[in-house]
Image (cartoon, rainbow, N blue to C red):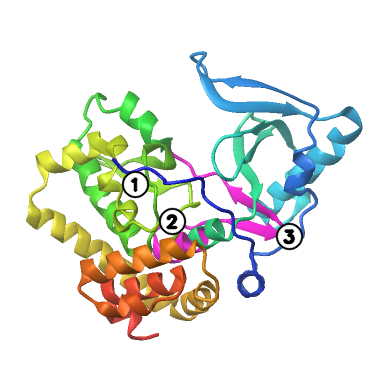
Amino acid sequence: MLTPTKKKLPYPVHPPLRRYLASYSRESELPVEYGTLTHHAESFPLLDRDGRDTLWRSVTFHPSEKDHVYQGLRDIYALLRASGDRKRMQHLAVSRVDYCEFGNSKPFRVRIVNLLNDNQDYFYVKRADASRVYGLELEHLLSPNRMHYYVWSDTLIEEHVVGLPGDQFMRDHLADPGFKEVRIAKEFVKFNERCSVRLLGDMRSYNYVVDITPDFEEVQYRIRPMDFDQQCYDGRRKFYLPKLFTENNPLIFFGIKHLDETSVAQYEGEERALISLRIKVERNRLGQLLEAMCAEPLAPPEKILQLRGEMAEFHRDPDFHYCRTMGEVLKKNLQTKVPEAMSLD
């Protein structure tokens, strides 16, 4: 059973990463920062529709601060969704702010409601941790998913990742009429390969979502990470393989049941080919990101030593032993897994 060894250490956003963020319009001055939301007046447990504790707490603000905070949050939503055009957002309002005291980022979740039709959307306000920012940007560049976020000072703003949390999907939907086990098994293989290539760790069932899309004949699934704290942080190579977490066993067993070795190798190869194409398209931008990433450790020295050693043994490549930072381990892993794309670097 794989579990995080200790609570993850936060890493500040250093100048090399800030320069990258500014170059690609990921940095923007914000009207409300994370510290502002920590000054809430009261909080109370948030329950789901079945009366279960969600582990989130809804927070309220002092009347003298509420209007300023809510207006600032609405302006942030305009930045995320309309490039800051507040005129298009006059019919929107903040209906709730929730806080989660568990996990590394201790996020605030903001619910936005359309007053004309009651449609809802969400975004998150978190402390800016370099690991998470690198994870978001790598997801944007190397996966089929686009990520929208902004950083300012020590605050990170993230859009909501749409989908059912993996644990909820496995709890409530595996018995749905017409559910095709082989389709989610295929997607899990591809998801596992993406995580292993870009070294995103701790993908237990509650750290990713399942996006369900009806197709003209069948339902399609896509698994998307929603937690990026463990980007290039743990020292164990196996920690970057979702297929080794017991929390994912239902999906793992579907793969064992329906997929033979040839099919698994096919899907893994397809995913690496897509990552290779994305690298070729974004090689200059990825090169700048990796340059910033290689300039800082992003993990304690013992974790870097452990991961580079395990990668060297697994790939039978002693060059991993020369990696000094997690960024260099990631770069070497990309060169090993998708060499035809990284050779253009």
Residue 115 seen in render = no
Up the image or down, 58 lies above or below 74; here it is above
Classify the position of the C terminus by image quarter: bottom left
Does residue 267 appear to the left or right of 86 in the view shown? left
Earlier-in-chain disc, 3 versus 2 = 2
Up the image or down, 288 lies above or below 217; here it is below
Residue named by callout 1: 222
Look at the numbered discs 2 and 1 and tell me whether their residues touch, using CB distance below 8 Å: yes
Does residue 293 appear to the left or right of 256 in the view shown? right
Q: Give the structural element (helix, strand or loop) at label 2.
A: loop
Amino acid type for the residue under numbered disc 3: Ser
* 306 or 100: nearer the viewer: 306
Does residue 48 appear to the left or right of 116 in the view shown? left
Residue 145 image label: 2
At 41% from the left and 41% from the top, the residue drawn is: 209
Bin the neighbour count of mark 3 within 10 Å (Cα to Cα): few under 14, some 14-19, many 20 and up.
Answer: some
Residue named by callout 3: 153
Find residue 132 and report its horizontal and vertical position in percent: 54, 56
Is residue 138 found inside the magenta-colored segment of the image? yes
At 12% from the left and 42% from the top, the residue drawn is: 256
Find residue 259 and report its horizontal and vertical position in percent: 11, 47
Displayed quadrant of residue 25 = bottom right
Classify the position of the N terminus by image quarter: top left
Q: Which residues are magenta?
A: 136-163
Find residue 84 and report its horizontal and vertical position in percent: 73, 56
At 67% from the left and 73% from the top, the residue drawn is: 15
Amino acid type for the residue under numbered disc 1: Arg
Find residue 6 and report its horizontal and vertical position in percent: 47, 46
